[in-house]
Structures are given as structure tokens and as C-alpha cells.
Amino acid sequence: MPPATPAPKSGGAALELLVHGVGGATPQDMLGDPRTVRVTGDTTAAMHRRADDLDAEDHPERYAERPVPEAYCWSNLTSGNGARALWLLLLPFMVVNLAHWMRPPGKGHPRLVRLYGVLVRLVALTLTVLLTAAACEVALDLTAWQCAGSAVCAEDRAWLGFVSAERGGWWSQPGRRLALAATVPAALVGLLWYLSNRTWSAYEAQRPPTGYDEAHAEPAGAEPTGFGFGSGQAEGDQDDSDSEESDLVVCGPAQCEPSGSEPAQMTGTGSADPAGPSDLRPALGRAGFWYGRRLVARLRAAHTAAGFLTVAAAVTGAAARHDRHAPDVLLEVFAWTLQTALVVLGAVVLWVVCRRGRSEKCLDLRLERTLVTWLPGTSLVVLALAVVHAGWSRPDWRSAGTLPGDATFGILTLAQGGLVVALGLVAHLLHRPHREQRTALFGLGGPAVAMLACALGGVMSGGVAQRVADWLDGPGTPGMGAGSPVAPPVLLSWQASVIPVLLLMLLAPVLFLALRTARAVRRLGPVVEAEYDAEVPDPVRTGRIAAGRATAGLTDSAPGFVGIVSGATLLLGAGSVAGAWISGSVPGRAFDGAHPAVESAADTAQSLGSWMIGFGFLLFVTWGRRAYKDRSARRTIGILWDVGTFWPRAAHPFAPPCYAERAVPDLTWRMCSWTRRTGGRLVLSGHSQGSVLAAAAVWQLPPVTRGRVALLTYGSPLERLYGRWFPAYFGPGSLRALHRTVHCWSNLYRATDPIGGPVRVPAEGAKPAVDRAVLLDPLVYGRTHEHPLPEPILGHSDYQADPVFAAERSVLLDRLPPALPRQRGGDADADADEQADRTDQGSSGRSSG
């Protein structure tokens, strides 16, 4: 990003706070100076200035004709050290977390809003169980139960010699092999817990600058009563609070005020917000929105316990099945006791997940009850008892076939499909009263994305099982060889077989989009030449510009494509479950004796699907390993997290952490502290994802500070992506409210930008429309005396290179009220706040245009 250009002399001290977008940027690039200094922050995220501007506040006379540029660099929150490349394996968890935030607005339907949140959290829980079950399938079933129990498989693998059934060693009994193998999925669950706890301490611990009074916090361990769906739920602990029902609330000694009350609005300085009822802040402006510490801790305990219980169930199920036919009554009683404990603890996990969602109305600083705190430890104890039970000597026990409990994957698939369908019904009921035309998939974006998360989880779990089975089984497709010693679950083979079918089904929409784009290029050619008034048209140049615009327009087709993929995945998933349960064999065997064409197609689909699903998993691992070593690849993966991890972890605690829970408080604190100390004007300049962070930070500002802040967004996905996919938080009503609450706002965009676009906020009263005229890209059509070399098509980058950027920023600075005299001394800060408040209120009726 080139340096900010000088603004006209007007209004006194001013600061331009630059926030970069996806992919990150260095402070040297943002400020256009190799000599930069970190003025506040740490190595993860910090504010930087040029070395020459470090003492700008002490010498305001030097900056009478230009604002002081300051850059906020947050890229290390998502693409820092190499270990974060491993977050790629958490992709299904991140995607299902996005589904939580994609619900339609739910004003007047709090029970549906809470039900939506509960369903998404249950889908997220099934993904944790699925991942753990996949690890159990590989370690317990394929390796310890099938391969180690087969002389053909074990004799070729020396590392399995000490557990081989043919060797007759101490570990040769099936129960002891399972007990040893259980350490692998248990270690995986422990690793997920560790990573979640570590990022929880670093990200969710950042408190936003609100007027919350520590003296009024609830006593440690306090817990509201009532279930999340009932009217007896404690006030202030609403589950999945609706973003349009009420504004911030005042935190009392033991509760938050109910949503029907009319409290003074909490601000960063503790003052009341003078805004009327129509200007109530949406959820993004609430005190507790960017402080989800308690919910993540609660979900982490539940998901960790669910993982340990899944491993314990896999170990106990095999041993209990054998003990039912054994003469030892004590072992049978022990098995029934363990199974009862598993059912009870599983019910507790479901209760913890369903009971409560996010509390956004105030900072929730309370601690969880002992039940939740000790839930993972209790589950680990049950797992240890299950291992002891399975390891008890049973000389007559032999392993044959697949591990009991093979139906687990079928039950999980049906549960996920049922939850997604129920989620779609709730989303439809929420969307029906509003029916915003630009909402993605008519409000069904959340269910569609949740279905994609389940599909990604299935690909990863099925891929690792297929590859391990293929490796242990030798040449040939897993499950197809006669007398094969190792075979994965039948359902996983069916799910792999539908992948080629899905790709064939997607050929039609892909060809349609390609043809439509080609037609758009031809249609836009004359439009481009007319806009540039080209006297001598250049077909090549015209074609490139038109192709840039037409390709950028493909972003608006993403909802339809996602809907087709999700719908096809749901139908094919249901078909794979039906095929596996009806036939009881893999697709290549299920169609034996059918028409030769059908039989050949089934064999091809299974072979190709097995290869593709394994290749997909290996691609994840390879990409993560490359990103661990390659900084440029790590930055590419970081772009995915820039978009996917903006939202707090409201559904899955093992998802990559939310960087906005650090970045938004950083920006809010900086704007509040600078305007409080100097009384000057501030232009918050956000590019791409930085504009989303900027908007979220402005919503968190107190009214005194908002009156001194102008918002400049460019290449912004606020409406094009966030407004369409997250209508409850960035819908038309929320963006219009942001326009009203900020002093002034301008948005720049290009037709060639595939990410940014207009925010579609019209003029209101004295405030002009937010969107400015679409910028030309490239700046000139051909060669001129001022531009002797061809100008590039910039698309999403280098907005500050356009002269309109500097001009628009100058206009925003001129609209802001003049800087207040700088105050010094102990009591001067309070006087400055009072003077700023009077200035803000006195100018509220003045034209900002």
C-alpha cells in the first residue's frame, strides 16, 4: 500500500489509521517508509508509525497540512509461525463455526434464534465425534483389531510383531491390543484440547474497552438457572442473543437487565449513549460480543469429554460384546457399569452443549460450575477404566472381521443429515418475515455451509481410513480383494464412491458459469470502450478489461453454486447410507450380477473414489507441511483464515481462533485513547477485510469517540460477502445503522474487484450515500503523454494509487468537527470528554455533507 497523500489544511490535528486486508502487509509497505517504529502492541499485532512521525502529538505545527499516518498490522494473528499451518486440518470445524453466524435476522423470534444456535452446536459436536471415530477406526479397527489379528497382514510389518496374534505375546490378546491402540485417538483429543486452551488464553482473553464495573461483577462460580429454551433462563444469559432485539445492557451485581428495559447505554468512558431507539447498536456493538471466553471454555470441556468418551465406547464395546458370552460375571458387570457411565456422561455432554449459547449483552466474567470444569477429567478416568477392562486377560478371545460398532459412521451421517434438515427449516422460518432479496440462498446459507462442513469432515475421516486400509491391504481397492485381511467400514467406501458422481454433477453449473462469463465479456466490450471514450479501440485491451469485470462478477454467483454442492452432497450422502445398509457390502460387490455397464460403473466409481478421497486427505497434509516450511505458502493459507476466522468460536471450540477478538479491541482502544488524549480527528481507513474490522471497531466506540471518527472503506466485502452471507449482523438494517452512528462514511470500489463492492447504503437526511462512483480500472485505456506505459488492471489491490482516494479522504477530514484544544493535567481529561460530548451533540444536526 503506498503512503497516504497529504490532506488539505483543515480542522487541526488528524490521524489516519490504516488497516490492511487479507494476506497481510508490512508496516513499511503501508507507510511507504523503510524506517518504521512500533508505537504500541506486540510482535503479533501492533500500531506502527514512520520514525519521523513518532512525536507527532508533541509537534502539531508540523502536521497542519496532513494527517499523521499510522498502520495497524494484524497479519500475524492468522499467518504467523509455521505451526499455524496445521490449522488447515481444522477446516471442518472452522466451516461449521461460520454456519452459526449465517442465520437470518430473528427479531421477534428469540426461541427460533436459540434453537438455531443449539442445532449448529450439535452439528459441531458430531464433527468432533466423527474425527475421533476416524482415529479409532485407523488405530483400533484397521491396525490393532484386523491387521494385528491376521497373520498375513502382521507378518509383513515388523513394527506389529509384538502385538501380533500369531506371536502369542502378552500384547497379542485383542483387548490389550485395543487398549494400547487407544492411546492414539486419546492423544489426538488431548492435542485438540491443548491447542484450544492455548489459543483461548491468547485470543479470547482480550477484553474490549467498555464501561463494565469490576465491582459489580458476579461472584465467582455463580450460575443462572433454567434451560436455554425456557422462560426461566437467567436474565442477561440469553442463548444466541438476537442482534436486533435490544442494545447493550447494564451489568448488575448478579445479572444483566432484561432486554425489555431501557438502561443507559454503556460506553467506553461509562457515559450514556444519547442515541434514540432507532439508533440502538446491533450485536456487533454489544459489550460482550468480542469476549466469548466463557462459552469457548464451556464448549471445550464438552467436546474434549465427547472425544474421550468416543474412544472409551470403541474400546468398551468390543470387550463388552465378548463378556456377554463369557462365564466371568464380574467382567460382565464391570462392562455394564462402564456402558452406563458412558451413557450418563454422554447425556451430560449434550446438556452442556445445548444449555447455553453466547452472552453478548455484557462482559461475562463468571466461572463455570465444577460439573463443567471436571467433565473432561471424569471422561478421561472412564477411558482409563475402559482400557483396564479391555486389557484384562481373556485367553479365548480372538479378533475376526471388523471391530464391533461399525455402524457408528452410519449413525453419525444420519444424525448430521437430520440436524442439517432441521437447521434449514429453522432458517426458513427466520427468513420468511424479512425476505431480503440479496440474502444468500434465501436465508439457507447457514444450513448449506453446515452441510459442507459435514462433507469436509467425511472426506478427511474417510480419506485417512481408505489410505491406511489401502496401505495395510497392499495392492487393490480396499474391501475388494478376496480374503482381504483389512477392510474399512462399508459406508466409508460408499461415501468415497459418490465423489466422482458429485464431480460429474457439478460439470453442468461450471459449464453454465463459463458460458455466461464469456457472454458477459462480449456484452461488456462496447460498454468499456464507451466509458473510456476510446477513439481508436484496441480489441485486446478491451477484452482484458471486460474479462476482468466479468470474472469479478462470478463472486455474486457463489451462493447458487454452494447451494447446488450442498444439496447434491445431502442427497448423495443419504444414498450412500441406504446403499451400505441395504447391500451390506462395498459398491463394487453390491452390483455383482447387474448389467455389465452398471457393474463396471460401480467398480470404477469405487476405485476412483477411493483414490480421490485419499488424495484429498493427503493434499491437506502436504499443503500443511509445505506451509510449515514455506513462508509464501503459509501466507496463502493465512488468507483463508483471514476470511474464515473473523467470527468468534460460538459453535466449535477446536476451530482456529478468532483474530477479531484481539484486533477489534486493539482498534477500539487505540481510537478511544488517541481522541481522548488529543481531541483530534481520525480517519479509519480499511481495505478489504480491514474494512470489516474497521466497521466492527466503530460499532464498539462510545458516542464521544464516534463523533470524531470518519470511516473510509475500499475494496470492502461488507455488503457483497458479509451482508449476503451474514444478514443478522451485516444486513441492510445493520449497515444503515452504522451509517447513522458514524460521523461520516465513504466507500470506494471497482467493477474489476472480485471481493469488494458497493455497500448499498442510501443517503439519509443530511448524510450523503456511502458509495462513491465506481472507480475506473485501469485508470487510462491506452498510452498517453501522462501514462506512456500501459496501466495495469488493479482489481482488488492498490486503491490508494487512485487519485480519488486522497480526494475522498480530504473530504472526510473536512466533514469532521475541528480538533479540540489539547488538554494536559490530571483533571483535564474529564474536561476534554465533556467538551467533546458537547461538541458531538451540538453538531448532530449539522450537515455532514
Image: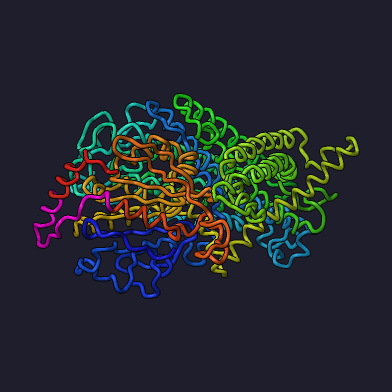
- Front residue of 570 and 678: 678
Side of 537 where 667 appears, left or right: left
Residue depicted at 71% across the width and 33% down the height:
578
Visible residue check, residue 72: yes
Compared with residue 569, is residue 30 higher up or lower down, i.e. above or below? below
- Front residue of 767 and 8: 8
The residue sitting at the bottom extreme is 35
Q: Residue 576: where, in percent of width, then height?
A: 71, 37
- Front residue of 726 and 150: 726
Compared with residue 372, is residue 685 higher up or lower down, i.e. above or below? below
Side of 362 where 390 appears, left or right: right
Side of 601 where 45 appears, left or right: left
Q: Residue 93: where, in percent of width, then height?
A: 52, 48
Q: Residue 146: where, in percent of width, then height?
A: 72, 53
Residue depicted at 40% across the width and 28% down the height:
111
The quadrant in which the C terminus is found is top left
Residue depicted at 72% across the width and 34% down the height:
581
- Front residue of 348 and 842: 842
Q: Which residues are magenta?
A: 814-834
